């Protein structure tokens, strides 16, 4: 697919039920390699990232079967293999191959991981956790020569490193303790899956305690995607319409809803349904992206479009200080901003149609939101980046009244 052509400027109205969360499904799919058995994972979104993840785990001998939104992974006949560099380079979540392969084979090659290129994305914390659990690096390989439980103290909360530490520690006999961990809902979802595989895990605010065991196949139902939900709420607001979302626990979107209220939007939450609308000009607001339960960095590009449609504001990002490259693309739609190290200023902007290249997954969604908010014809190139994370994007957008053509 070459581009998405958008005829924007009409208020989008309606309801979207979100899919299973990309960032929750991915570590669970890779963690299934740590079992000797069959895992059953429901509500797996059918998006490029999960397709690549399933190909990567098949390359290691797992039999994978998708039946609707349920995926079965049989990890009883795994064999060591070097994962295809091309597949590894496509998704950030291929970092989970490290924890999964160390657990399954006791070794894993060092690889060049891919994914959104919005900031430097080091792996030192992942490697630190593996070293603590008895691994060492020899030539181009991480080798788990001396697996043992350990205390792991992260100096920074990292979703990926926490997930990898959990995956590896769950299969090592004995009690490991992880401190300074990330607490995103997808970490809780991974903990639930590892528990279903036989690990005993206790979650406290300041630590995760893991009693590792020989793991059997597990079961999971992937939680709803809070980033997808926030993206569609922002989209409705920017187009001057009103979109409601359901399918993900509303408390996960508390920080995002607080942000919407702070710009002057009226936000309504009824059981698992959230909707929002901006009447009038809104208010100048500021928001800081930081580890959960604070405002999620993945919704920071969406926040920029909301601020531009309201009265402007400031975005700070404490997770990825320079995650503002996407603003360059948004300027092609008239979104005015000034970027600094660690924060950016967003000015109230009259959007106009334009052409843009999706810079990354969430930056691409911000481009699409601007295009749908601007009256006239716009084009978004490299739409495959968007399809990495938004299931049934075309269908969902059409059902809220978007005039778009994929192709
Ligand atoms: C995951 C999500 C991504 C989200 C991010 C933060 C997936 C596939 N991706 O990415 O969508 O934007 O969480 O919520 O779930 N860091 C280090 N050393 C490391 C690892 C991370 O310094 O070894 C730093 C990063 O540079 C960043 C911070 O830790 O400043 C958080 O990154 P992390 O939570 O690891 O992000 P990912 O797991 O890559």
Image (tube, rainbow, N blue to C red):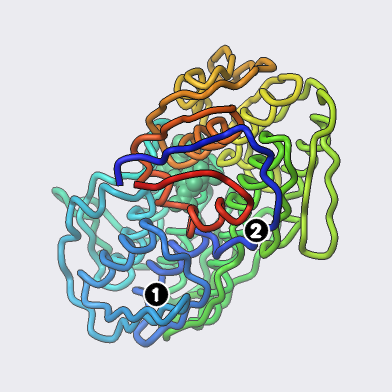
Side (left or right) of 363 relative to 228: left
Q: How many marks?
A: 2
Q: Badge 1 local density, few (<14 within 10 Å), some, or many (20+)?
A: many
Examine the rendering and report whether any part of residue 160 can be seen: no
Say which of 24 and 67 sits in front: 67
Say which of 406 and 250 sits in front: 406
As drawn, 312 above or below 110 = above
Q: Residue at x 62, y 42 (%)?
A: 296
Q: Residue at x 42, y 53 (%)?
A: 129
Say which of 62 and 19 sits in front: 19
Side (left or right) of 326 relative to 188: left
Q: Badge 2 local density, few (<14 within 10 Å), some, or many (20+)?
A: many
Which of the two discs, 2 and 1, sits closer to the camera? 2
Find out if the beta carbon at label 2 lies less than 8 Å from the nearest ligand 1 atom. Answer: no
As drawn, 249 above or below 325 = below
Find disc 2 in the rendering and name its residue. Answer: 16
Of callouts 2 and 1, which one flags the residue occurring earlier in the amino acid sequence?
Answer: 2
Looking at the picture, how far across and down is residue 116, in whole percent? 39, 40
Report helix, strand or loop for mark 2. Answer: strand
Examine the rendering and report whether any part of residue 237 can be seen: yes
Find disc 1 in the rendering and name its residue. Answer: 32
């Amino acid at each position: 697919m070459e581009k998405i052509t958008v005829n924007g400027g009409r208020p989008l109205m309606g309801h979207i039920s979100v899919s299973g969360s990309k960032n929750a499904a991915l570590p669970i799919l890779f963690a299934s390699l740590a079992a000797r058995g069959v895992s059953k994972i429901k509500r797996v979104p059918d998006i490029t990232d999960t397709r690549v993840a399933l190909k990567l785990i098949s390359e290691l001998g797992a039999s994978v079967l998708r039946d609707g939104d349920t995926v079965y992974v049989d990890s009883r006949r795994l064999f060591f293999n070097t994962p295809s560099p091309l597949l590894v380079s496509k998704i950030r979540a291929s970092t989970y191959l490290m924890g999964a392969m160390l657990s399954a084979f006791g070794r894993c090659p060092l690889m060049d991981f891919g994914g959104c290129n919005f900031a430097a994305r080091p792996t030192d914390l992942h490697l630190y956790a593996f070293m603590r659990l008895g691994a060492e690096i020899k030539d181009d390989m991480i080798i788990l020569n001396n697996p043992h439980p350990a205390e792991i103290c992260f100096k920074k909360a990292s979703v990926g490193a926490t997930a990898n530490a959990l995956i590896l520690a769950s299969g090592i006999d004995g009690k490991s303790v992880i401190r300074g961990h990330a607490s995103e809902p997808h970490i809780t979802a991974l903990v639930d899956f590892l528990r279903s595989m036989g690990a005993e895990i206790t979650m406290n605010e300041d630590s995760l305690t893991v009693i590792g065991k020989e793991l059997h196949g597990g079961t999971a139902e992937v939680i709803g995607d809070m980033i997808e939900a926030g993206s569609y709420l922002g989209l409705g607001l920017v187009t001057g319409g009103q979109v409601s979302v359901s399918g993900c626990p509303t408390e996960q979107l508390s920080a995002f809803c607080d942000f919407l209220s702070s710009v002057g939007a009226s936000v309504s939450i009824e059981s698992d349904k959230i909707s929002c609308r901006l009447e009038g000009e809104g208010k100048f607001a500021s928001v800081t992206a930081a580890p959960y339960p604070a405002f999620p960095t993945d919704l920071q590009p969406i926040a920029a479009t909301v601020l531009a449609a309201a009265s402007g504001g400031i975005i700070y990002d404490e997770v990825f200080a320079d995650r503002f490259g996407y603003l360059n693309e948004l300027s092609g739609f008239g979104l005015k901003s000034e970027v600094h190290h660690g924060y950016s200023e967003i000015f109230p902007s009259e959007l106009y149609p334009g052409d843009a290249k999706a810079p990354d997954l969430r930056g691409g969604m911000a481009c699409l939101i601007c295009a749908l908010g601007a009256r006239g014809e716009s084009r978004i190139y490299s739409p495959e980046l968007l399809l990495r994370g938004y299931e049934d994007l075309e269908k969902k957008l059409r059902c809220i009244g978007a005039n778009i053509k994929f192709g």
